[in-house]
Image (spheres, rainbow, N blue to C red):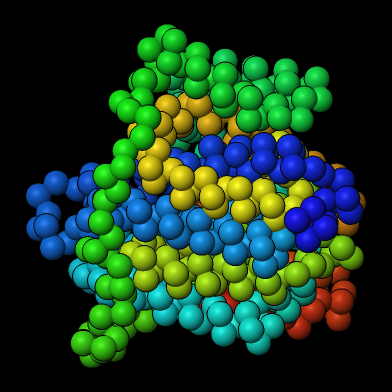
């Protein structure tokens, strides 16, 4: 096992990998609650039951998709990157596809399935890996830093340290709020652990914050430890296949094509950004290339197809994996640990009640601090590099989208390089992406 996962080569051990895998799980366990609430449109009143997915079935599908994706990533690609149904993509699935377009959730699942199959084909032909390796190193560093700022912003938001403000767009929240105070306490504890060089600092910061939250009544005590009454997957399992065989004509619409292409586009570049960012932080990049990128992308693609069949929206690589890397994870064994924990979580669902956004927010903030260190690798004295790198980085938190930040930076990169008389140094693929991203923004408009 140690030889397969290259423990000696990566300078890791079982303890670090298990703590890293557990930390990643805790940082992303919220998806087990948030995804079912999103896909069932729980926040939208007075909807016909036919428009809502089954909560219990989606919960189990979420856990199984996360387990499948994480274990595949660990075993095939040997990366400490966990997967689960993606935030943002699930909101698009529920609020745009179902609520706005009026497309049945069954057909929407078929759209996810189609996008996953297309991903597999692009991966097996090497197209996805070729595109990722064609991206210049400076932009990869900017992507990593931008994702760091983005998840820090999410952490500050989850803790309600930063809140919406009608006058200034954002502002400081109510720092007397008990949940916010708990997050600040967790941040102080985690920072102290990290400064002291404590390898499991992020994990133990989460643990201590959860315990303190329960002691002071900020976090509810779990209603139970285990629940053997696992919800049935019957309402969602295999439903994605039904329109293909029973009503293929319903798929021959512009709206369905838009759905498939949107899932395809956002997942492609979110995954690319996440893989590069996590690999950079873990020190796994070699000569500006991602080793075993094809296997990592294949694991991601298969997980999307599997998730669609189980009954959930697009499964994708999670940037919260960086919290596990920060806690010491370096190999795919950590992802296997995370995947197994998602399976176990199906039974221990009541315990997830103590892992609130206030408890996990400090982990996201600290990970952001670690990820922006890649800014030091960018040559800021070259203005033709500085502009696209900066715009890539800043657009992610401000646009609240990894894909949007990548799109803006990749549009400016060929322009600045041509203006600097270095157009021949730009890989042809980057010119192709320039056209695609320009069309993407035109389409969005």
Visible residue check, residue 295? yes
- Residue displayed at 48% across by 80% down: 117
Q: How many marks?
A: 0
Which quadrant, please, contains the N terminus? bottom right
Asked where in the image residue 27 lies, by quadrant, the reply is top right
Q: Position of residue 156 (x, y in %)?
A: 53, 31
Visible residue check, residue 375? no
On the picture, is 86 further left or further right than 406? left
Q: Position of residue 136 (x, y in %)?
A: 80, 67
On the picture, is 205 further left or further right than 445? right
Asked where in the image residue 327 lies, by quadrant, the reply is top right
Asked where in the image residue 419 lies, by quadrant, the reply is bottom right
Q: Position of residue 275 (x, y in %)?
A: 68, 59
- Residue displayed at 48% across by 26% down: 358
Front residue of this view, candidates 21 and 371: 21
When the figure is inspected, residue 207 is found, relative to residue 394, above or below; the finding is above
When the figure is inspected, residue 242 is found, relative to residue 171, above or below; the finding is below
When the figure is inspected, residue 192 is found, relative to residue 277, above or below; the finding is above
Q: Position of residue 184 (x, y in %)?
A: 56, 18
When the figure is inspected, residue 177 is found, relative to residue 19, above or below; the finding is above
Front residue of this view, candidates 145 and 13: 13
- Residue displayed at 79% across by 43% down: 13
Which quadrant, please, contains the C terminus? bottom left
- Residue displayed at 69% across by 74% down: 294
On the picture, is 2 further left or further right than 74? right
Front residue of this view, candidates 368 and 343: 343
């Amino acid at each position: 096992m140690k030889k397969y996962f290259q423990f000696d080569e990566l300078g890791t051990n079982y303890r670090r990998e298990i703590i890293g895998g557990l930390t990643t799980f805790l940082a992303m366990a919220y998806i087990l609650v948030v995804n079912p609430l999103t896909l069932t449109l729980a926040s939208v009143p007075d909807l016909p039951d036919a428009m809502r997915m089954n909560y219990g079935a989606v919960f189990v599908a979420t856990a199984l998709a996360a387990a499948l994706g994480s274990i595949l990533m660990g075993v095939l690609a040997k990366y400490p990157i966990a997967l689960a149904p993606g935030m943002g993509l699930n909101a698009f699935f529920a609020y745009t596809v179902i609520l706005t377009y009026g497309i049945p959730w069954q057909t929407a699942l078929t759209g996810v399935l189609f996008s996953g199959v297309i991903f597999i084909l692009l991966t097996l032909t090497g197209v996805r890996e070729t595109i990722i390796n064609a991206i210049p190193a400076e932009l990869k560093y900017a992507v990593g830093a931008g994702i760091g700022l983005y998840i820090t912003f999410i952490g500050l938001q989850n803790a309600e340290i930063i809140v919406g403000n009608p006058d200034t767009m954002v502002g400081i929240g109510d720092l007397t709020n008990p949940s916010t105070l708990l997050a600040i306490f967790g941040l102080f504890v985690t920072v102290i652990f990290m400064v002291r060089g404590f390898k499991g600092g992020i994990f133990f910061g989460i643990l201590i914050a959860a315990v303190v939250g329960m002691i002071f009544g900020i976090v509810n005590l779990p209603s139970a430890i285990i629940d053997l009454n696992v919800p049935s997957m019957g309402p969602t399992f295999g439903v994605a296949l039904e329109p293909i065989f029973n009503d293929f004509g319903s798929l021959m619409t512009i709206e369905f094509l838009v759905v498939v292409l949107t899932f395809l586009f956002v997942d492609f570049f979110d995954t690319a950004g996440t893989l590069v960012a996590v690999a950079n932080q873990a020190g796994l990049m070699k000569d500006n290339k991602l080793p075993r990128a094809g296997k990592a992308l294949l694991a991601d693609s298969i997980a999307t197809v599997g998730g669609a069949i189980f009954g959930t929206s697009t499964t994708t690589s999670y940037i919260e994996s960086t919290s596990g890397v920060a806690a010491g994870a370096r190999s795919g064994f950590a992802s296997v640990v995370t995947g197994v924990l998602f399976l176990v979580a199906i039974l221990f669902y009541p315990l997830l009640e103590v892992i609130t956004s206030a408890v996990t927010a400090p982990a996201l903030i600290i990970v952001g601090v670690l990820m922006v260190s890649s800014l030091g690798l960018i040559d800021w004295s070259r203005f033709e590099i500085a502009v696209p790198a900066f715009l890539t980085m800043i657009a992610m938190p401000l646009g609240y989208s990894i894909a949007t930040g990548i799109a803006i930076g990749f549009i400016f990169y060929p322009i600045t390089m041509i203006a600097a008389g270095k157009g021949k140094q730009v890989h042809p693929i980057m010119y192709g992406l320039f056209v695609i991203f320009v069309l993407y923004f035109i389409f969005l408009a």
